[in-house]
Image (cartoon, grey):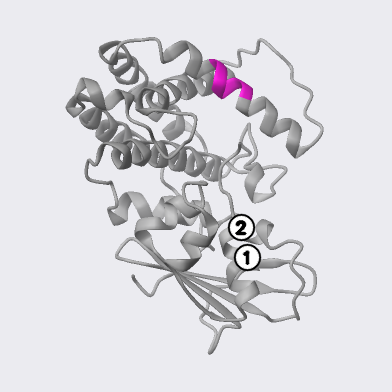
Amino acid sequence: MTDRISGTEPILCAPLLRLIETKLLELLHELRDEEWDLQTLAPAWKVRDVVAHLVDTPFRKLSLVRDRWTVENPQIHSPQDLVAFINRLNREGVAVYRRLSPAVLISLIELTRDHYADFHESLDPFAPATFNVSWAGESTSLNWFDTARELTERWHHQQQIRHATTHPGIMSPDLYHPVLDCFIRGLPHAFRQVDAPFGTIVQLDVSGDCGGTWLLAKSASAWSFAKTHASRPDARAIIPQEIAWRVFTKGIDRPDAIAQSSLEGDRSLAERIFHLTAIVG
């Protein structure tokens, strides 16, 4: 773990999308036929289903955002409506693409890799994004955050495949730290209903060379990230980087995650970190 304090600067990671897709293609070319039917951490999805999802979502994003092509106008009036809508789209996409052979799925990812990366690299990172990052509580997000969210999607679904097939993970600082930093941007929203005195500090450390430190501070009306270390935080959680991605993507039971982590100070505040879910659905 480094002593860097994260959470306060934009995550400018568009060039990493091309790299993460290249690593995905290298992985898929290595899979044996039987590995495509292994169960992943996502209860409803085997490896072929996760790959189908990774094929579906770039086509959707390019069609909706780059090409402005819309075939339905969903009525989203609540977070529950959004979750239901996204879950339906995901189910429909997986149902179609999971029928395809590994060779065809790989060819489709090869087809979209550069188009998808080129599109995100072309965006002004500080302009408003088409889609908000809902799990961070934002009604409007900037492109850099939406692109970082896309990186987390591509990274953690690929990691699910690697976990299921026991292939080496992609926990390198250049790829995994931006993913963690993006996930953890949802902490202020996760703490929005947590009452605490003004000036309360909650510290999250993710251990390992890809990790870092995030400091959540309570103001008079909200929680936000701080830039400087507190002399002594009121609560602290240390999560191993090996399980951190699973904590924030519903890939591990909360009691198991807490048991594998270290908590200090106000335990109720430290445990609240484990309630953060940085995915939709």
> Crowding at label 2, few (<14), some or many (≥20) Cα neighbours within 10 Å?
some
Give the residue drawn at x 48%, y 19%.
94
Quarter of the image that includes the N terminus: bottom left
Residue 77: % across, % down: 82, 32
Secondary-structure class at tag 1: helix
The spot of residue 214 in percent (x, y) is 51, 68
Does residue 199 belong to the magenta stretch? no
Q: Quadrant of residue 212?
A: bottom left
Towards the viewer: 122 or 27: 27
Residue 26 visible in this rendered orientation of the protein: yes
Residue 224 placement, left or right of 205: right
> Residue lying farthest bottom?
231
Give the amino acid at mark 1.
Arg
* Image quadrant containing the C terminus: top right
Q: Residues within 10 Å of mark 1 (few under 14, many from 20)?
A: some
**Is 120 displayed left or right of 241 in the figure?**
right
Q: Which residues are magenta?
A: 88-92
Q: Are marks 1 and 2 in contact (CB under 8 Å)?
A: yes
Residue 187 is situated, as x and y percent measured from the top left of the image, at 61, 60
199 up-or-down from 51: above or below: below
Q: Which residue is mark 1?
A: 272
Residue occupying image coordinates x 21% and y 30%: 26
Amino acid of disc 2: His
> In terms of depth relative to the viewer, which is nearer, 161 or 202?
161
Residue at 49% over, 24% down: 57
Task: Check disc 2 and report the residue beneath it.
Answer: 275
Q: Tell me if I can see residue 15 in this picture.
A: no
**What is the chief secondary structure element of the magenta stretch?**
helix
